Image (cartoon, rainbow, N blue to C red):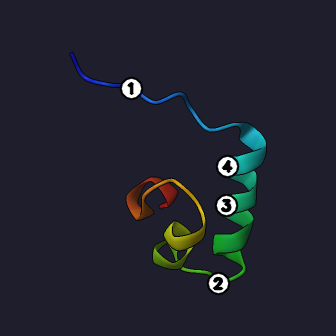
Amino acid sequence: MPRTRASYPPEFRQQLLELVEEGRSPEKLVEEFDPSASTIR
């Protein structure tokens, strides 16, 4: 059976979006946060 992960809270998603909009790359954010770069994109 495939494992599923609980969705990230809206505040966390918003924080990641703001960081990407500021110019941070998803690859760099992976070093600080849990989601993969493809999830951040």
Q: How far apart are marks 1 and 2 (CA)?
A: 30 Å
Image location (x, y in percent) of residue 23: 65, 84
Q: Residue at the spot x=63%, y=72% of the render?
A: 20
Image location (x, y in percent) of residue 38: 39, 59
Image location (x, y in percent) of residue 5: 45, 30
Q: In this view, does 4 lie above or below 26?
A: above
Q: Which amino acid does label 3 sit on?
A: Leu
Left or right? Give the position of 31 relative to 38.
right
Q: Distance between the residues labelled 4 and 3?
A: 5 Å
Question: Tag 2 or tag 1, which sits nearer the N-term?
Answer: 1
- Mark 4 burial class by Cα count in 10 Å: few <14, some 14-19, many 20+: few
Q: Quadrant of the N terminus?
A: top left
Q: Circles 1 and 4: CB distance less than 8 Å?
A: no
Secondary structure of the residue carrying numbered label 4: helix
Residue that carries the numbered disc 2 in the rendered image:
23
Q: In this view, does 34 lie above or below 5?
A: below
Q: Which amino acid does label 4 sit on?
A: Arg
Q: Residue at the spot x=52%, y=72% of the render?
A: 31
Q: How far apart are marks 3 and 1 (CA)?
A: 21 Å
Residue that carries the numbered disc 3 in the rendered image:
16
Question: Tag 3 or tag 2, which sits nearer the N-term?
Answer: 3
Secondary structure of the residue carrying numbered label 3: helix
- Mark 3 burial class by Cα count in 10 Å: few <14, some 14-19, many 20+: some
Q: Circles 4 and 3: CB distance less than 8 Å?
A: yes
Q: What residue type is labelled 1?
A: Thr
Disc 1 vs disc 2: which is toward the camera? 1
Q: What residue type is labelled 2?
A: Gly
Q: Is residue 13 above or below residue 37?
A: above
Question: Tag 4 or tag 2, which sits nearer the N-term?
Answer: 4
Question: Tag 1 or tag 3, which sits nearer the N-term?
Answer: 1
